Image (cartoon, grey):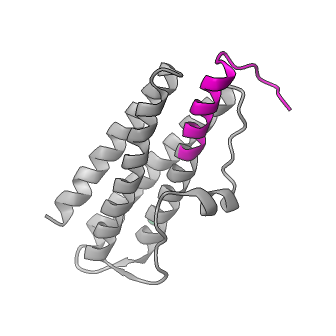
């Protein structure tokens, strides 16, 4: 069912919609991973890491909405269902239970790194197909890389 007419050609739309859908699941999963660790972190640096994780949650939630609504804007139905996220996220799973602060930070460095790598690939992939969507990916990448820097500095 097509409700919203896309301004893009079918070929360009295919490239951009795959990039937006991939970004959506990565960002939803990043928000879940960061919350999971926010609740489970323990150790001497609990307070700072606990609060820092919620900043990642805020960024991931904000930008998951940005990319989902960009997809809708282009006439593509976004899929943020739990099963879809579980099957297609680029983030490795997080073990259950308490997480030492140093491991929590390491987990976030890895998770952010994985999402950033895929987001930069989306920047590359969408430049010609749709520079407007590419601009969104660039902005998201900048925000994620700032978080990535701060978590790397935590364990420096
Ligand atoms: Fe909280």
Question: Where residue 38 appears, x then y in whole percent?
Answer: 42, 68
| The residue stretch that appears in magenta | 1-22
Q: Quadrant of the N terminus?
A: top right
Q: Quadrant of the C terminus?
A: bottom left
* Magenta region includes residue 42: no
**Frontmost residue, 65 versus 9:** 9
Name the residue located 46 percent from the left edge and 27 percent from the top edge. 134
Residue lying furthest top: 7
Residue lying furthest bottom: 97
Question: Where residue 42 appears, x then y in whole percent?
Answer: 33, 80
Question: Where residue 70 appears, x then y in whole percent?
Answer: 60, 30
Name the residue located 72 percent from the left edge and 27 percent from the top edge. 75
Question: Where residue 46 appears, x then y in whole percent?
Answer: 29, 73
Count the labels in the image.
Answer: 0
- Is residue 73 shown to the viewer in this render? yes
To which quarter of the image does residue 49 belong? bottom left
* Magenta region includes residue 8: yes
């Amino acid at each position: 069912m097509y409700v919203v007419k896309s301004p893009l050609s079918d070929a360009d739309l295919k490239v951009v919609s795959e990039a937006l859908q991939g970004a959506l699941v990565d960002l939803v999963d990043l928000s879940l991973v960061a919350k999971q660790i926010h609740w489970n972190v323990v150790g001497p640096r609990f307070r700072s890491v606990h609060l820092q994780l919620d900043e990642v949650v805020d960024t991931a939630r904000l930008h998951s909405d940005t990319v989902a609504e960009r997809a809708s804007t282009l006439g593509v139905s976004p899929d943020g269902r739990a099963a879809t996220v579980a099957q297609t996220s680029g983030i490795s799973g997080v073990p259950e239970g308490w997480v030492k602060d140093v491991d929590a930070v390491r987990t976030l460095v890895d998770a952010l790194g994985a999402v950033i790598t895929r987001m930069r690939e989306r920047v590359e992939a969408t430049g010609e197909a749709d520079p407007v969507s590419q601009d969104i990916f660039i902005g998201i990448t900048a925000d994620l890389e700032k978080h990535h820097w701060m978590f790397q500095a935590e364990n420096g």
